[in-house]
Amino acid sequence: MPDRMDISKPRCRPTLPEGVGDQRAFQRAFWAVQRVAWLVFALILLACLLGLLGRGGIFSMKAVASSGGDIEIPAISRWNAPDEMRVTLGASVVDQTVYVDSRFLETFSVDGIDPPQKTTVQKNGRIGYVFRSDETASAKIIFRLKTQQPGVRAFLVGIDNDVAEHSTIILP
């Protein structure tokens, strides 16, 4: 069995050939920078998976409860990227209206609505999308959006008379 190494003795460093310098300090610094870069990349990847950098993930959408149903709006989005707003209208005997204001239309362009609205109305400076209601089941509507400008954008959105201000962060 070989003898255990005595840690009190200094290590013998091999002699390097002539013209070759000892680069151990540089190599340690390079490895440290490499580990920091790995950590930063892992944090960016985790932020992407959680939805903190745009579409997808648990933090990318914000749920808004309303008296007429629920609205999911983008909490964080990317500039010039497609996104969507999902509206669930509760069962009702009268037609229901989803209202947005002009600031919403400055933030997002509405590329399409599935299913299409019955009609469009204007009330108190807001644009309303009227949808047929079913008294036995809820309706799911998807607004296909495209972001217009980066930054923190505030706007009004809601169902029928329950309209409130919300905001979205649009990353460049």
Image (cartoon, rainbow, N blue to C red):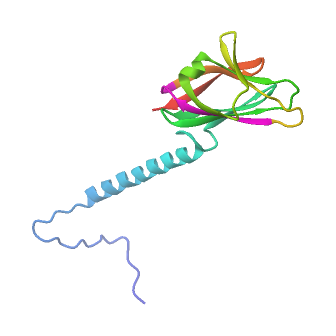
Q: x, y percentage for residue 64?
A: 72, 29
Q: Quadrant of residue 87?
A: top right
For this orientation, the residue located farthest to the bottom is 1
Q: Is residue 149 magenta?
A: yes
Residue 136 lies left or right of residue 143; in this view the side is: right
Q: x, y percentage for residue 13?
A: 24, 71
In this view, 53 is above or below 99:
below
In this view, 137 is above or below 159:
below
For this orientation, the residue located farthest to the left is 18
What residue appears at the point 64 percent right and 43 percent down from the top-left corner? 58
Residue 66 lies left or right of residue 56; in this view the side is: right
Query: Magenta residues: mostly which secondary structure?
Result: strand
Residue 9 lies left or right of residue 23; in this view the side is: right
Q: Quadrant of residue 20?
A: bottom left
Span colored in magenta: 139-151
What residue appears at the point 29 percent right and 59 percent down from the top-left corner? 27
Q: x, y percentage for residue 48?
A: 53, 45
In this view, 125 is above or below 130:
above
Q: x, y percentage for residue 32?
A: 36, 54
In this view, 130 is above or below 5:
above
Q: Quadrant of the N terminus?
A: bottom left
Residue 35 or residue 73, whichever sits in front: 73
Q: Quadrant of the C terminus?
A: top left
